[in-house]
Amino acid sequence: MAEKKKVVRKKVKVLKDLCVACGACAKECPIGAIRIVAGVFAEVDQDKCVGCGKCKRVCPASVIELV
């Protein structure tokens, strides 16, 4: 029988103090796990997020980390 590999899901962390709230990450998220809070910063719903990294790739301020 083939051995199963455990997939480790990355968590997305937004550096809220540096976020410019442009919304690019929220638009790119295929799951809809990101929202812009009060026009100030992006917030990730970790229960929905699949850790694909698409948000990180489109962030113009480079304030999204996969941890």
Image (tube, rainbow, N blue to C red):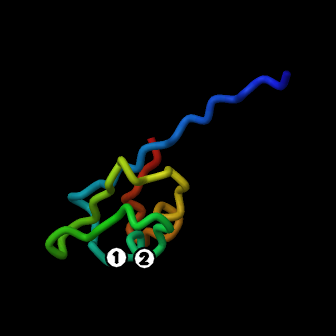
Of 1 and 12, which appears nearest the observer? 1
**Residue 15: horizontal and vertical position, in percent?**
29, 54
Depth check, mark 2 against mark 1: the one in front is 2
Q: Residue drawn at (40%, 57%), measured in percent from left and top?
A: 64
Of 11 and 17, which appears nearest the observer? 11
| Left or right of residue 51: residue 61 | left
**Residue 51: horizontal and vertical position, in percent?**
50, 50
| Left or right of residue 45: residue 66 | right
Of 2 and 11, which appears nearest the observer? 2
Residue position for label 2:
27
Which element type, helix, strand or loop, lies under badge 1?
Answer: loop
Q: Residue drawn at (78%, 23%), measured in percent from left and top?
A: 3
The 10 Å Cα crowd at callout 2, few under 14, some 14 to 19, many 20 or more, is some
Which element type, helix, strand or loop, lies under badge 2?
Answer: helix
Quadrant position of the C terminus in the picture: top left
Quadrant position of the N terminus in the picture: top right
Residue position for label 1:
23
Q: How many marks?
A: 2
- Is 58 rendered above or below residue 10? below
Q: Residue furthest right?
A: 1
Where is residue 2, by image quadrant? Answer: top right
**Residue 52: horizontal and vertical position, in percent?**
55, 55
- Is 24 rendered above or below residue 67? below
Mark linked to residue 45: none
| Left or right of residue 23: residue 56 | right
Q: Amino acid at mark 1?
A: Gly
Q: Residue furthest left?
A: 38
Contact, CB < 8 Å: mark 2 with mark 1?
yes
**Residue 6: horizontal and vertical position, in percent?**
63, 29
Q: Amino acid at mark 2?
A: Lys
